[in-house]
Amino acid sequence: MTRALLTLALAFSVIAPAAAHPRLADQEDALDRAITAAPGDPELRLRRARIRRERGDHRGAAADLEAARRAAPEDRRMDLERARLRADAGDPAGAEEALAPALAGPLSAGERGEAHELRARLRLGRGDPEGARADLTAAIEARPTPERYLLRGRIDEAAGELDAAARGYREGLDHLGGAVVLELALIRVERERGHLALAIARIDALIRRAPVAADLRLERAAILAAAGDREGAEAELGRALQEIDGVLERRPSALHALTRARILAALGRRAEARTIAAAIEREHPKLPQAAALIAELAVDGGGR
């Protein structure tokens, strides 16, 4: 697997859920009482299986699914939930096996989209980007979401298919009414394709609408640098740093501090950026952006 595809696999792999919301326990208690009154109701069993899976109770979820399947053997939602359970339990092969009958039978548009997206992530995790891309296209056709367009575009980018990535992001923007995450992805691809005037026009439109534009100014500086306007890029970074410092005075947060660290890194003040990122990682160990920035800063080492 290439480094780009490996990065995609890690970024979009199916992982076990984090600690469940406390309200899930209350929902499970209510379902316990309902199932005691109607033990053969497959809908109740399916709902409790989902909650148990989200809480990390894989054995309990599997027991509920088996009971639900006995009561409604033709209901393909049971196969979809079994696939989710196996994926969460760290069994991607078993999850793909369960998805085959789910996708072969009747599902709602939303459920079919979820099934194709899950299989796309599983296929990407085992190094099959072409299969993953086909599933994402099917998922988008069933129910488009920004995340599905973004993941498909990332696969195109990893394969060097920048024209296809740009088309996909534009399609998503047309269908979803201007999702910012897709706009940013398209701006990045336009920069990589050398369409710098288009990238600048799009980033300027976003900056005019954004309540906090420091991260957008960081991207604008990168575009100006790519165009050979080093002086303009430095000036834009200065504006970004001034803005984020003001934001941090009013509303300090780890994400805003990370934006400041990225701006400092772009200004060549890498040691300061590393110090900030390391402090955030210690205080917020579950924040992946901090670890990602530290890894970026470690690529070529050194720096001021």
Image (tube, rainbow, N blue to C red):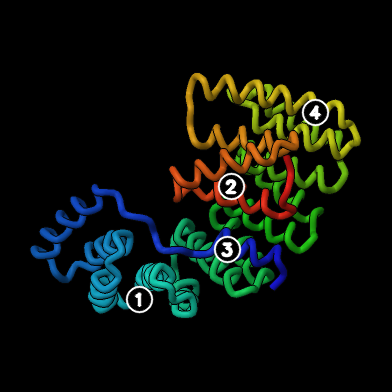
Rendering quarter of residue 197: top right
Q: Which residue is mark 3?
A: 10
Q: Which residue is mark 1?
A: 74
Instruction: Give x and y (percent) for residue 48.
Output: 24, 62
Instruction: Give x and y (percent) for residue 146.
Output: 58, 47
Foreground residue, 223 or 149?
A: 223
Q: CA distance from mark 1 to mark 4?
A: 63 Å
Q: Quadrant of the C terminus?
A: top right
Crowding at mark 1 (Cα within 10 Å: few <14, some 14-19, many 20+): some
Residue at figure coordinates x 59%, y 23% from the top left = 245
Which of labels 2 and 3 is toward the front?
3
Q: Circle 3 sits in a helix, a strand or a loop, which is it?
A: helix
- In the rendered structure, which disc, 2 or 4, sits on the residue that comes first in sequence? 2
Rendering quarter of residue 206: top right
Which of labels 2 and 1 is toward the front?
2
Residue at figure coordinates x 61%, y 49% from the top left = 294
Residue 234 is marked as 4
Residue at figure coordinates x 27%, y 67% from the top left = 57
Height in image: 280 above or below 115?
Answer: above
Q: CA distance from mark 2 to mark 3?
A: 19 Å
Q: Amino acid at mark 1?
A: Glu
Which of labels 4 and 3 is toward the front?
4
Instruction: Give x and y (percent) for residue 287.
Output: 48, 47
Height in image: 232 above or below 3?
Answer: above
Asked if one can make out residue 54 in the rendered structure from this viewpoint, the answer is yes
Foreground residue, 178 or 16?
A: 16
Q: Is residue 302 left or right of residue 211?
A: right
Crowding at mark 3 (Cα within 10 Å: few <14, some 14-19, many 20+): few
Q: Which residue is mark 2?
A: 146
Query: In the current view of this chain or complex, which residue is farthest to the right?
Result: 228
